Amino acid sequence: MQIGLGYAPVLEEKMRILVVEDEVKTADYLCKGLSESGYRVEVALNGLDGQHLVQEHEFDLIILDVMLPGLDGWQLLQIIRRKLQTPVLFLTARDAVEDRVKGLELGADDYLVKPFSYAELLARVRTLLRRGPPREVEQFQVADLHLDLLRRKVTRNGERLTLTNKEFALLHLLLSREGEVLSRTLIASHVWQMNFDSDTNVVDVAIRRLRAKVDDPYPLKLIHTVRGMGYMLEAQE
Ligand code: CA
């Protein structure tokens, strides 16, 4: 005889996916497929509707087409990333490497080149949803440099450094991507929310100011210029 343990059945809340895609056929196909796979799907047929939905509702994943009327996928992604860490899967029609790099630099989590199979899309969707939004790290430490995000406090060798808001944001970005070369366009879009086509000279100026406080007074240099590529923060031997 089995004794019931009295557990209430777990009603699984459906994961919510936003599809931003202007090709009605593709949008319908995605909506139908993902709904059948058990997701709750909202569709926006242009970038502005997509932006509106992102601002009004919470999603677990956003599937974003690059070529959209009004507001394109790049622009929408930049708007999303100012506030949200929701995983974004990019759909790109062209198999151009620059497109993929640009998408990933702007904060997309993965991309699919059209045409793709539904099975392929579903596999990516499942992986991204399992991964979930990255947890915000609050403390960063590289060598004797320390940044506390909550207290907005930066110290080096135990000495408190006074940074402007932009310098703090820039250092936070460099620390959160320690050991990675960050291009000027990526830095500009993260710290100043500037378009990637704008003049990125402002980045060089800000790096110089940041170095004057963070690196110049200390023997071990942490901020490195990578010729023709950008900047990187790392404790090199
Ligand atoms: Ca399109």
Image: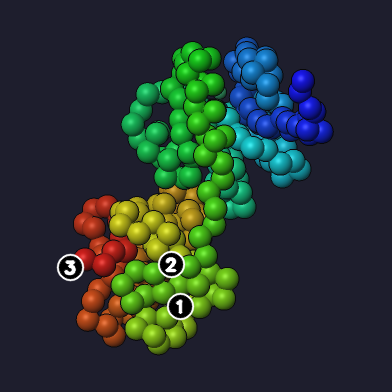
The Cα atoms of the two marked residues, 3 and 1, are separated by: 22 Å
Q: Which residue is mark 3?
A: 237
> Looking at the rendered structure, which numbered label has been put on residue 154?
1
Query: Badge 2 local density, few (<14 within 10 Å), some, or many (20+)?
Result: some
- Front residue of 131 and 9: 9
Mark 2 → mark 3, Cα distance in angstroms: 19 Å
Q: Which residue is mark 2?
A: 140
Residue found 56% across the figure and 41% down from its top: 132
Image region (quadrant) for ligand 1: top right
Q: Circles 2 and 3: CB distance less than 8 Å? A: no
Say whether marks 2 and 1 touch (CB < 8 Å). no
Task: Identify the element where label 1 is drawn.
Answer: strand
- In this view, the mark in front (2 or 1): 2
The amino acid at mark 2 is Phe
Q: Position of residue 24 (x, y in %)?
A: 65, 16
Residue drawn at point x = 50 percent, y = 78 percent: 153
Task: Give the mark nearer the N terminus: 2 vs 3.
Answer: 2
Q: Earlier in the sequence, mark 2 or mark 1?
A: 2
Q: Amino acid at mark 3?
A: Glu
Assign the C terminus to one quadrant of the image.
bottom left
In the image, farthest residue toward the left: 237
Residue kind at label 1, given as amino acid type: Val
**Horizontal side of residue 7 vs 76, given as left or right:** right
**Looking at the image, residue 159 lies above or below residue 226:** below
Alpha carbon separation for disc pair 2 and 1: 9 Å
